[in-house]
Image (cartoon, helix red, strand yellow):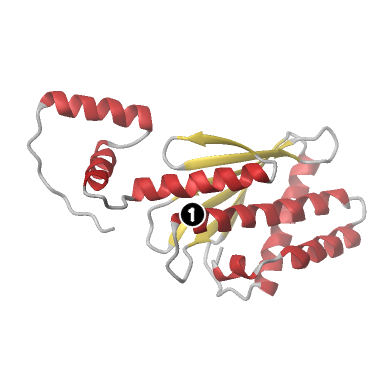
Amino acid sequence: MSKTVYSLVLSQEIVAAVDALAVRGGYSRSSLVNHILAEYASLMSPEKRARQLLDTLEHEAGRRGFRASRSPGGMLTLRTALPYKYNPALSYTVELRGEQAVLGRLHLALRSQNETLLACLALFFDLWRRLENAHLQLPPERDAYRSGGKRHTRVLRRPVQESSAEAEGELIAGYIALMDGCLKTYFHNLDDAPTALRETERHYLAHLQQNIALAQL
């Protein structure tokens, strides 16, 4: 949905009420007005579509045992625990973007100060990149994978074929479940590096679904 700048004459009372609603909902004034008018005209606004996607993602992730929390601005964080020494908290944060080709970004983070553990997470993320490049046959993408400190990011591309917000939410949930299963398999076998690599790839191939590949996630 393309956007154009328009000038509107509104009463101060309406602007004040809209601004208050925008702050409570985590919107900008323009985004909220756009959303309200789209609702009135029975159109699908970007805000409504994002909400539907996150609603579906939250539901599907909940069925898989993740704990979910929302943040303003189109972000959803899914939390679980890594079954490895003290069970450190592991989070997957989906950040939606309004870019044409990019659906959003998935951030993987481990709540730990253990440098060895964080280094192992970085090694897993590099393995994940290599698995995708080997088995999904996706075209090379610049900056599709980013690592920095405690957080690792995977760009989520829009599906090639037109799809609903609900379908995209289901795809992202499946993608996160696949990554989480591989990550836990990797750490379960961490004491034996060759076994960790072999079992992680085995889990990946056993649970890889064609719809995830088609989504270009």
Element class at badge 1: helix
Is 54 situated above or below 113? below
The image quadrant where one finds the C terminus is bottom right
Left or right: 131, with 165 as reference point: right
Quadrant of the rendered structure where residue 172 is? bottom right
User: Toward which corner of the image does residue 84 lie, by quadrant?
Assistant: top right
What count of labels does the image hold? Answer: 1
Can you say whether 75 is above or below 137 in the image? above
Residue shown at 68% from the left, 52% from the top: 177
* Front residue (pair 36, 93): 36
Visible in this render: residue 111? yes
Residue 45: x, y in percent?
Answer: 31, 50
Residue at the farthest left position: 9
Residue 28 at x, y = what percent?
30, 37
Residue most toward the right?
A: 192
Percent x, y of residue 101: 42, 64
At x 47%, y 50%, the residue is 53
Tell me the kind of residue under disc 1.
Glu
Quadrant of image for the N terminus: bottom left
Left-right relation of 156 to 149: left
Nearer the observer, 140 or 78: 78
Residue holding disc 1:
166
Q: Between residue 43 and residue 73, name the one nearer to us.
A: 43
Task: Give the residue displayed 33% in from the left and 28% down from the top.
Answer: 23
Name the spot of residue 131 as percent of width and height, x first.
71, 67
Q: Is residue 140 above or below residue 196?
A: below
| Badge 1: residue crowd in 10 Å (few <14, some 14–19, many ≥20) | some
What residue lies at 22% left-to-right and 44% top-to-bottom? Answer: 40
